[in-house]
């Protein structure tokens, strides 16, 4: 989480937040608050952010938005690596599941496997004032954050050199190889809030 005198930025998990934090640090701004990537409080909800910095309650809110199929794939790999013992409602553990098996379960159970829970949890019923697009993150950061704080050209160059850690599976061509026809559409059906937001921010859904 980052708080300045003019905005709150929420670090929503699996949306290139650590890379975004590095971009903020390049600005050398006197932040009201900037959580290091090692601090678990970096993943604060909007309500928690306002509790930690009460004077920021009325500030605009900014957050990152990642394409849903990329986020789902990243979440699966994260769970396999860091929490293989975590189980789905049917008892299957991530350590024993292939991505295909996990994806089939998610699409078949919209009642409890919607990734809209992420937006609902971190934002409740609110919408951010601005979104940073994880696809083309540096350019989006310069465009959006540059509207609130000055970003000198030399700093812009350093920001452009920071890569979002989205994994090799985040490449568009590679991404399609993980999904069978109709599965990406199935994910979006499970996540109407995410789909609506992605259309707004990216101009359409991933295919």
Image (cartoon, rainbow, N blue to C red):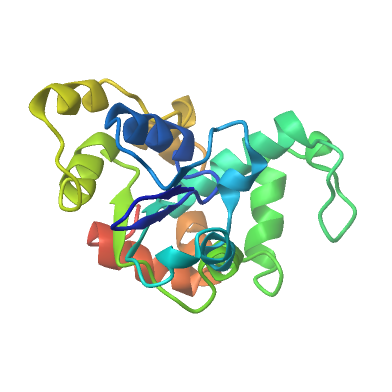
Q: Is residue 145 left or right of residue 2?
A: left
In the rendered image of this protein, does residue 161 appear above or below residue 198?
A: above
Examine the rendering and report whether any part of residue 180 can be seen: no
Q: Is residue 180 left or right of residue 90?
A: left
Q: Nearer the viewer, residue 130 or 137?
A: 130
Q: Nearer the viewer, residue 148 or 125?
A: 148
In the rendered image of this protein, does residue 42 appear above or below residue 200?
A: above
Q: Quadrant of residue 196?
A: bottom left
Q: In the image, residue 114 lies at what x, y percent?
A: 61, 66
Examine the rendering and report whether any part of residue 160 can be seen: yes
Q: In the image, residue 149 lies at what x, y percent?
A: 19, 46
Look at 87% across and 39% down and name the residue there: 85
Q: In the image, residue 170 lies at what x, y percent?
A: 43, 34
In the rendered image, the residue lying farthest to the right is: 91
Q: In the image, residue 22 lies at what x, y percent?
A: 39, 29
Q: Nearer the viewer, residue 121 or 5?
A: 5
Q: Is residue 148 left or right of residue 68?
A: left
Look at 55% across and 63% down and name the residue there: 122
Q: Nearer the viewer, residue 207 or 70?
A: 70
In the rendered image, the residue lying farthest to the bottom is: 125
User: Total label count?
Assistant: 0
Q: Quadrant of residue 139?
A: top left
């Amino acid at each position: 989480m980052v708080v300045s005198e003019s905005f709150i930025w929420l670090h929503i998990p699996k949306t290139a937040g650590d890379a975004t934090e590095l971009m903020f640090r390049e600005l050398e701004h006197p932040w009201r608050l900037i959580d290091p990537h090692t601090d678990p409080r970096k993943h604060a909800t909007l309500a928690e952010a306002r509790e930690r910095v009460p004077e920021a309650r009325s500030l605009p809110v900014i957050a990152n938005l990642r394409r849903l199929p990329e986020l789902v794939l990243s979440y699966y790999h994260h769970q396999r690596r860091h929490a293989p013992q975590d189980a789905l409602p049917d008892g299957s553990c991530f350590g024993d599941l292939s991505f295909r098996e996990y994806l089939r379960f998610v699409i078949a159970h919209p009642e409890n496997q919607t990734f809209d829970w992420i937006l609902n949890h971190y934002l409740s019923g609110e919408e951010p004032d601005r979104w940073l697009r994880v696809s083309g993150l540096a350019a989006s950061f310069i465009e959006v954050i540059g509207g609130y704080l000055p970003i000198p050209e030399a700093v812009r160059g350093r920001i452009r050199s920071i890569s979002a850690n989205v994994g090799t599976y985040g490449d568009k061509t590679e991404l399609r190889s993980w999904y069978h026809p109709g599965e990406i559409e199935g994910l979006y059906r499970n996540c109407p809030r995410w789909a609506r937001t992605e259309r707004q921010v990216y101009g359409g859904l991933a295919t």
